[in-house]
Image (cartoon, rainbow, N blue to C red):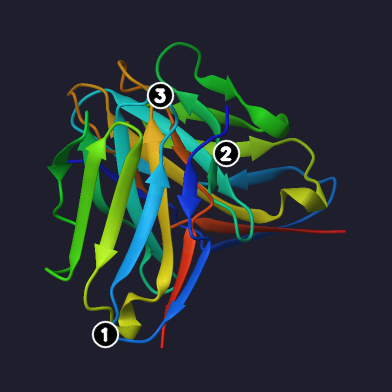
Amino acid sequence: DAGVIQSPRHEVTEMGQEVTLRCKPISGHDYLFWYRQTMMRGLELLIYFNNNVPIDDSGMPEDRFSAKMPNASFSTLKIQPSEPRDSAVYFCASRAVGNSNQPQHFGDGTRLSIL
Amino acid sequence: AQSVAQPEDQVNVAEGNPLTVKCTYSVSGNPYLFWYVQYPNRGLQFLLKYITGDNLVKGSYGFEAEFNKSQTSFHLKKPSALVSDSALYFCAVRDGGTNAGKSTFGDGTTLTVKP
């Protein structure tokens, strides 16, 4: 099992640029979560999907952020335009089908720096 | 609604001594409780969970946690700490009484084990 795969691992870009973060969940998992982690705010849930459908996007900070899950094996988180305050580590996680007593499996994150 | 509190930002222990990382929770229904560990530059890794049954749950790397319903607590413990246990620890809760898809995470506790 390859685990949750995120790309890129690091991204440095200038403010105003579009940023796209990618996630491949574990095969067979039907929940996918996007989180943001910063020193100031800790771990924040941005959005999550069930069977490729967005269920709760109340954590998305503003309209500059968007997330899609076109199929069960791929999701993207896009920031356009990016701002320095978006600098953070972004994690993707997936969870197995069925019982809600299963843990989440996290990728190793994308460290995003907006200059 | 569901919530988690980790009252200590930091816990320091000497190697070989027992350690406890505290967690209290609040949910409307039955609590599904989880502990995760995060090492530097890595995603969160699942340690253990309580769903039902025995109040003492054993997990990875010699960790265990005790569920206490009356105190609404789920403290993480280890009889003898190792320097390699130094990391950031997160407690999480999900309401098992609903079909809630998301977990709520605490703010994390940094554990430092000194040689």
Q: Are marks 2 and 3 in contact (CB under 8 Å)?
A: no
Which label sits on residue A16? Answer: 1
Could you give the CA–CA distance between mark 2 and mark 3, rounded to whole angstroms? Answer: 19 Å
Q: Chain of mark 1?
A: A
Give the numbered dot on residue A102: 3
Q: Amino acid at mark 3?
A: Gln
- Write down the chain letter for disc 3: A
Q: Secondary structure at mark 3?
A: loop
Q: Residue at x 71, y 55 (%)?
A: B86
Q: Which residue is mark 2?
A: B76
Q: Quadrant of residue A87?
A: bottom left
Residue A86: percent from left, percent from top:
32, 75
Instruction: Left or right? Give the position of B26 relative to B115.
Output: left
Quadrant location of the N terminus of chain A?
A: top right
Q: Look at the picture and state if B93 lies above or below B8.
A: above
Look at the picture and state if B101 lies above or below B89: above
Label 2–label 1 contact, CB within 8 A: no
Residue drawn 84% across and 51% down?
A: B15
Relative height, residue B115 to residue A24 (above, below): below
Of discs 2 and 1, which sits in the foreground?
Answer: 1
Element type at marker 1?
loop
Question: Is there a contact, CB below 8 Å, between mark 3 and mark 1?
Answer: no
Q: State the image coordinates of residue A46 (x, y, percent, origin top left).
A: 25, 55
Along the horizontal axis of the image, is B50 left or right of B72? right
Query: Closest to the observer: A108 or B61?
Result: A108
Q: Amino acid at mark 2?
A: Leu
Q: Nearer the viewer, residue B60 or A88?
A: A88
SS at mark 2?
Answer: strand
Instruction: Give the residue type at disc 1.
Output: Gly
Q: Nearer the viewer, mark 3 or mark 1?
A: 1
Report the Cα–Cα distance between label 2 and label 1: 43 Å
